[in-house]
Image: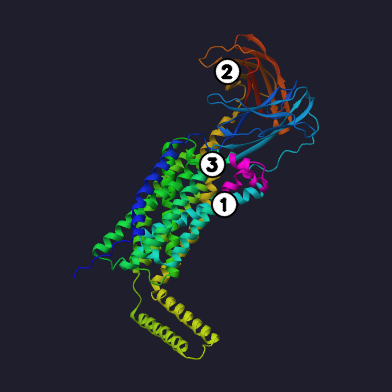
Amino acid sequence: MTATAPAPSTARARATAFLPRLALVLAALLATLFTAAAPATAHAALTASDPTDGAVVATAPAQVTLSFSEQVAMGDDSIRVLDPQGRRVDTGELRDMCSGNTIRYGTALHSGLPNGTYTVAWQAVSADSHPISGAFTFSIGAPSATEVSLPTTTAGGGPVGIAYGIARYAAYAGFTVLVGGAAFILLCWRRGAAERPLQKLVVRAWVTLTAATLAMLVLRTPYTGSGRFADAFDLEGLRAVLETKTGASLVSRLLLLGAAALFVAVLFGVYARRLEDAGTEEETAGEKAGDTNDLTFGLAIGGAVVCGGIAATWALSEHASTGIQPGLAMPADILHMMAVATWLGGLSALLVALHKVPGIEHSAVRRFSRVAFVSVVVLAVTGVYQAWRQTGSWSALTGTEYGRLLLLKVALVAVLLAVAYMSRKWTARLAEAPAALEEADAQVGAQVAAADDVSRETSSVTVPADPERAAQLARQRAALESAREKRVRDADPNRAGLRRSVLAEAAIAVVLLVVTTVLTSTEPGRTVEQEAARGSTATAVPDRAVKITLPFETGGSNGKGSVRLELDPGRVGANTLHLWADTGDGQPFDLPEVKVAFTLPAKDIGPLPVVPDQAAPGHWTASGVQLPLAGEWRIDVTVRTSDIDQTTVQKTVKIG
């Protein structure tokens, strides 16, 4: 007689038909998010200011301007200028002075400012979502005492920064366990969909990721702004956050988590019941197996799209969306995160199954071993590309914080692979419980059944049942059931060895996840070296003139060019200064004004102003330029190309 699988219920049919539509909708959402991404450079840095840090100007400037290495997000209160008494002297209106590759913002100052030392405090949000801040001083006329203290904490620090960081860690952990747990069930052990321990693991991971995402969205305003928890309830601030790339990514993640909730409901509802109706995977045959396989395939496709969409919310708002090759880096980052989650999250699911579920088949463990191997291959390929993209050189790999953290991550992965190799050996020796222990399990089962019989007999008596006796029988039955499950779990010593090795893997994976999270908030090594190169020190060769070239851009029309500076003989004492200005096409640039200043920060000397005389179009000279001490002197060159357009560029030279 041919067995015929029962027809699916209406609810099941709707769930099965909904999955392809869900996949298409999420794929369209993912494509829309990708097209909205814009390339940038990771971690913005302040490259110049006018006035410069520590400068002494003869007359009060009309405005203060800041130049950055990449696009930043700033508001009207992002630049504050304070007088010596701590009163604001800026107008509070942000001026967007960006032009082409020049990223410059400024704020106007009130007229008639008296002499003294003024403090400029600024705060912005980098293109990779991290807040940056800083402060410096300049003086009008002459330096003076000031009551303003430069901030000792950076943007994103303090208690709000700690809370936001905890939410980031929790989000990564929740994503890893959610994706890995679901993948373990669908790819390795389908029967696990009906097991309560695995259901609790995946559902708790979803709750953790959702709560962490909500916390990051609410804390975003104080995290990038005032640093006060009370600003988390500022609706205007929340509205401003939603208009940023990071805010849009967090909202998109919440929407995708809604789809993930539906996926989890189908996985532990319709799918688990269908498996129970059909029997275990090994017992399923014929049309029942085909019906279950179709639903498994649909869940796998829908889950992969949801997983990729959630991973994209990180790729589109952090390091992958900035720097070089963002179009390739973002898909690589998504694959990297999915591989990590499948491996480490699946590892957590396997650990729970080995400790909580007595009947996990050794075939499921072997399947996970193969899935983990594929994940490690994807992890290695994408990781090598990310390492090259974020460091770019051996010096950045060994000489920057990002590079050292990356080396630590590689070492942890190597240790994790070594422990995983031991787990594979335990998996190969994994066997079913010995016959003697199976017989003991049968005895325990008989004891449980006897306890049930006693309970039923007690309840059938006409006199009222003793509540204390009923509670005692329930406790005995629970103890016997727990003992039976423990016997099944510990039946095979190889299974116990596998549990210990998987537990070691999970412990290393937790440390690896922490290091990975720290990496996402650390400035990439390539960017650190690029910023160091902008302000690198030129060393003077004895008895040979110091020669440097500094490109500039004032932001106005015909405002691009470069200055070539020569300091002869480039040593302590009197020197002769020559300065040439060239346009972008190499022609002499007859600037309306050129000023030079020398500062020795280590000795608090300077700035020593020099106003060279024009010797020819595009050529200025000054004699008797005195440098009293040896050290690393900073040369600031201020060029003005029109009545209102000017900038200051700088370079540090070592005078021996």
In the image, residue 250 above or below residue 550:
below
Amino acid identity at mark 1 = Ala
* Left or right relative to 210: residue 433: left
Numbered badge on residue 167:
1
Residue type at mark 3?
Thr
Q: Position of residue 587 (x, y in %)?
A: 53, 12
Q: Is residue 479 magenta?
A: no
CB atoms at circles 3 and 1 under 8 Å apart?
A: no
Q: Left or right: 143 with respect to 108?
A: right
Q: Nearer the viewer, mark 1 or mark 2?
A: 1
Q: Which residue is mark 3?
A: 246
Q: Position of residue 428 (x, y in %)?
A: 34, 66
- Residue furthest out toward the top: 616
Q: Is residue 28 above or below residue 142?
A: below
Mark 1 or mark 2: name the one nearer the start of the chain.
1
Q: Quadrant of residue 1?
A: bottom left
Amino acid type indicated by mark 2: Gly
Q: Is residue 269 visible?
A: yes
Write down the residue under mark 2: 559
Q: CA distance from mark 1 to mark 2?
A: 45 Å
Read off the magenta span. 216-239
Percent x, y for residue 171? Answer: 52, 52
Q: Secondary structure of the magenta portion, mostly?
A: helix
Label 2 packing within 10 angstroms: few (<14), some (14-19), many (20+): many
Considering depth in this image, is 58 or 190 the residue closer to the camera? 190
